[in-house]
Image: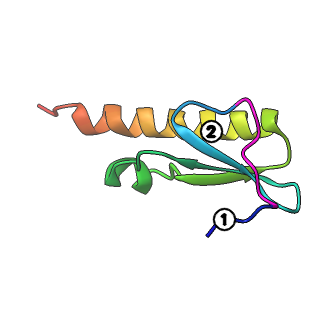
Amino acid sequence: MADARSTTPKPTIPGWRVILSDRGRLWASRVLPFTDAESDAAADRTVDADTLDDLRAELDRHEAIAREAAGRATRVTP
């Protein structure tokens, strides 16, 4: 069901669905879920913020967490 009060602000962020709530809060949900290892490392698939700049910073932080977790998962220990 669509909510006419919620909109997707422009510009959007590639790989994330951005939603502006009817209360003016920005939310983003990652299109593809993080792996279990990335999620276990605290990469959240859905985040929120007050401004688009803050939302971008939060998404960057979660993507960095995921990259670090993925790097650890691919390393082979001797």
Q: Closer to the camera, 8 or 43? A: 8
Overall secondary structure of the magenta stretch? loop
Q: Residue at x 70, y 34 (%)?
A: 56
Answer few, some or many: residues within 10 Å of disc 1's Cα (few below 14, many 20 plus, some between 14 and 19).
few
Q: Residue at x 47, y 45 (%)?
A: 31
- Residue 4 located within the stretch drawn in magenta: no
Q: Is residue 20 left or right of residue 66?
A: right
Query: Which numbered disc, 1 or 2, marks the residue that appears first in the sequence?
Result: 1
CA distance separating discs 1 and 2: 25 Å
Q: Would you place residue 23 above or below residue 12 in this image?
A: below
Residue type at the position of mark 2: Leu
- The percent position of residue 7, horizontal first and vertical second, equals 76, 50
Magenta-highlighted residues: 5-11
- Residue 9 located within the stretch drawn in magenta: yes
- The percent position of residue 69, horizontal first and vertical second, equals 39, 40
Figure quadrant of residue 62:
top right
Image colouring: rainbow
Which residue does the numbered mark 1 point to in the structure image?
A: 2
Q: Which mark is residue 59?
A: 2
